[in-house]
Image (cartoon, rainbow, N blue to C red):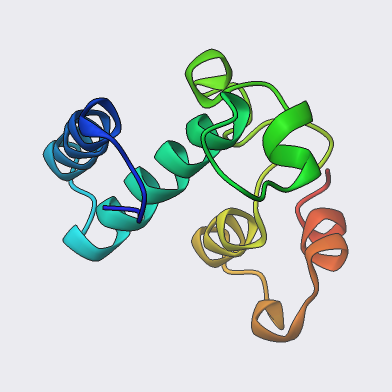
Amino acid sequence: MPAGANRKRERQYEHIKEGAERRGTSPGRAEEIAARTVNKQRARSGESRRASRTSIEDMSANRRGGRRSHSGPGGPTKAQLYNEARQRNIKGRSTMTKPQLQRALGR
């Protein structure tokens, strides 16, 4: 649990951590997700001494939800493109960059 948190934040941390673990996230990653989420909430509500600009100005984690996952200008990740190239048996895929993979796949 992040230092300086109150009971509400401790409950929030445990709830987020348990939810992430139920979805199959590793315990270490679940702790990281929970801590980052709680710290951002603390920064947004003025409970922390220091806060990054993005923690304060960016949309809240609750509102954001899954809006940023696998979408936007970046499109699919390099790993996703690589897996598709492997399925299509494209030669030289292991040394290709993301733009090269996109071209090879016709995107």
Q: Quadrant of residue 86?
A: bottom right
Residue 100 or 91: which is nearer the viewer? Answer: 100
Indicate left or right for 42 with 5 as reference.
Answer: right
Q: Residue at x 73, y 48 (%)?
A: 52
Position of 27 relative to 21 (above/below) = below
The image quadrant where one finds the C terminus is top right
Indicate left or right for 105 with 81 as reference.
Answer: right
Residue 102 or 31: which is nearer the viewer? Answer: 31
Image x and y of residue 51, in percent: 68, 46
Image x and y of residue 70, in percent: 60, 36
Image x and y of residue 3, in percent: 35, 56
Position of 72 relative to 20 (above/below) = above
Indicate left or right for 86 with 25 as reference.
Answer: right
Q: Quadrant of residue 85?
A: bottom right
Indicate left or right for 48 with 10 as reference.
Answer: right
Residue 56 or 82: which is nearer the viewer? Answer: 56
Q: Quadrant of residue 74?
A: top right
Q: Residue at x 55, y 43 (%)?
A: 48
Position of 24 relative to 89 (above/below) = above
Q: Residue at x 57, y 62 (%)?
A: 79
- Residue sitting at the far top: 63
Image x and y of residue 44, in percent: 61, 27
Q: Residue at x 49, y 34 (%)?
A: 42
Q: How many numbered circles are shown?
A: 0
